[in-house]
Amino acid sequence: MQGEIVIVGVNHRGAPVEVREQVALNGSLEHSLRELLAVPSIEEGVIVSTCNRVEVVAIAEDGDSAVDALTDFLGQGDQAQGRKLVDYLSVYRGREAVRHLFRVAASLDSMVVGEPQILGQLKDSYIAASPVGARQPPAPRKARTARAPGIGAAPSAP
């Protein structure tokens, strides 16, 4: 069965700096990815962590369970902390999640629209997830597609 793409996180649009700092990763990205992949409802995942956002892009068989699990994950395993985050979380599922991923990659969801760093950060997040067990299709395929027309890409010959 093909899973559903789910994105749960906080960003500059919906969460103040203090909340984003609480959600910031403790320890290495690799360690956080291993913890993410240990969550039973998550089949694969990528963590996008920048100064303005911490978002988990995941594939899950059950989207409802995944949203709950990712809320707890962002609360760093503390359900009470996760419940405090609910008012600040952005949740995207299915097509809406893919649309959000493209908006992030295109820097349309950045504090400074058009800034080029987010594309590289998204690519780095995807690269970091691969060696620790994130599977290729479908989430990484979406990330590759999102960055395909990105900054620095050579134009195609007619």
Image: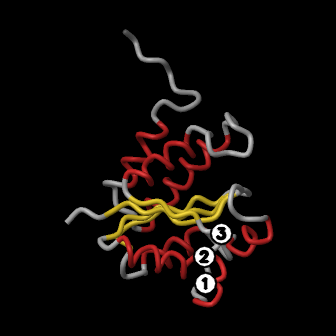
Residue shown at the point (29%, 64%) measured from the top left: 3
In front of the other: 58 or 88: 88
Picture layout, residue 39 above or below residue 89: below
In 3D space, how far apart are the residues under numbered discs 3 and 1 (Cα atoms)?
Answer: 10 Å
72 left or right, relative to 6: right
Picture layout, residue 38 above or below residue 139: below
- The image's colour scheme reads secondary structure
Question: Is label 2 in a helix, a strand or a loop?
Answer: loop
The kind of residue on which mark 3 rests is: Tyr
Question: Is label 3 in a helix, a strand or a loop?
Answer: loop
Instruction: Tell me how many marks there are.
Output: 3
The residue where tag 3 is placed is: 88
The mark that comes first in sequence, 3 or 1, is 1
Badges 1 and 2: C-beta atoms under 8 Å apart?
A: yes
The residue where tag 1 is placed is: 83
Structural crowding at the residue carrying mark 2, measured as other residues with C-alpha within 10 Å and reported as few (<14), some (14–19) or many (≥20):
some
The residue where tag 2 is placed is: 86
